[in-house]
Amino acid sequence: MEKDFQSNVFFSDNERYADIINGFGCDGIPFVKGKDLQEMDTRVSLGRRKGGKRSRKRKRTLYRDLVRKTPFGINFAVIGIENQEEIDYALPLRIMCYDAGEYERQATVVQKTVRKLHKGLTAGEYLYGFCKSSRLFPTVTFVLYYGEKDWDGAKDIHGILDFTDIPDELKNKISNYRIHVIEVRKLQDTSVFKTDVKQVFDFIRFSDDKKKLAELLEEDEAYRYIDEDAYDMVVAYTGEEKMFKWKEKHKKGGKVNMCKGLREWIEDERAEGREEGREEGSERMGQLIIMLTEQSRSEELVRAAKDAAYRETLFKELKI
């Protein structure tokens, strides 16, 4: 839950949200500006009523992570972000429900508008509240996956359907629904991002390589003045909770100097490594001393036994 909270805080910033839309959705072309995004209710209700009150269905409510209404010229698109740490093998179904619920929400608004017109409607248009010319805003959801394990789940609805013995002729007529999973740790190029999304994603994807991290922080000056919520996002998804203790020390004006924090982090790990090495060395030396002591005692016992046997034999020969 802590990771979900941090990621929701981080991407609640509309400039970062727009960066994700432009970076993943528009191949890096800056079509969208953060100031133009409109926040939307993250609740999704499934089960829209089709006709009158008698046909009202019981609705099921789902909750998305984040969703924004995004302008493109005179049109809009509805774009959601889901943050995922573990693999959800039923994710295509969940994302399809999110998007379908958004379309249902829009259709309900259209329905109310259409029924106010009355005149000029066909029987079907009035009954279902949707005209021939009615249109909905396109909707899409980007799934940001931060897990260390490679995503091996399905990325479309067909991937979770059992097509055993189903003829291809029928299979080809069963609608598919594709989802968009972005594996953050496997990103090859983060240059499409223009905000600190780049620095956060880079740190996460190189978090297992301290040498690469050190090079990254030295080359990119943005890490010297990274926002506090970006710093918290990094700590949450890399599991390096030790970095929290350096935040207050290296924070100034809502910014954190990650470069200094990383240097101290690496030095502490080296010191711990040296201490562990000394402890391990001391333990091994102690074991060696015990072994040698036991060996020495054994040799003394053997010599004593031999001496006793020799004396006994000698006494017998001398008849003493």
Image (spheres, helix red, strand yellow):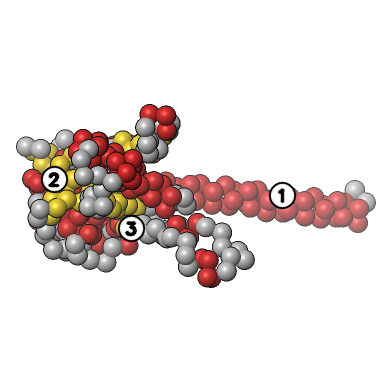
Q: Position of residue 9 (x, y in %)?
A: 22, 38
Q: Which residue is mark 3?
A: 180
Q: Residue at left 47%, top 65%?
A: 173
Q: Position of residue 249 (x, y in %)?
A: 15, 37
Badge 3: how crowded within 10 Å, few (<14), some, or many (20+)? some
Badge 2 element: loop
- Report, in whole angstroms, how far the alpha carbon at label 1 lies from the one at label 2: 87 Å
Say which amino acid is labelled 3. Answer: His
Tell which of 226 and 307 is nearer to you: 226
Badge 1: how crowded within 10 Å, few (<14), some, or many (20+)? few
Badge 2: how crowded within 10 Å, few (<14), some, or many (20+)? many
Question: Outermost residue toward the top?
Answer: 53
Q: Residue at left 54%, top 52%?
A: 288
Q: Which residue is mark 1?
A: 301
Residue 230 picture quarter: top left
| Rendered position, 101 above or below 168 | above
Badge 1 element: helix
Tell which of 154 and 85 is nearer to you: 154
Numbered label attached to residue 37: 2
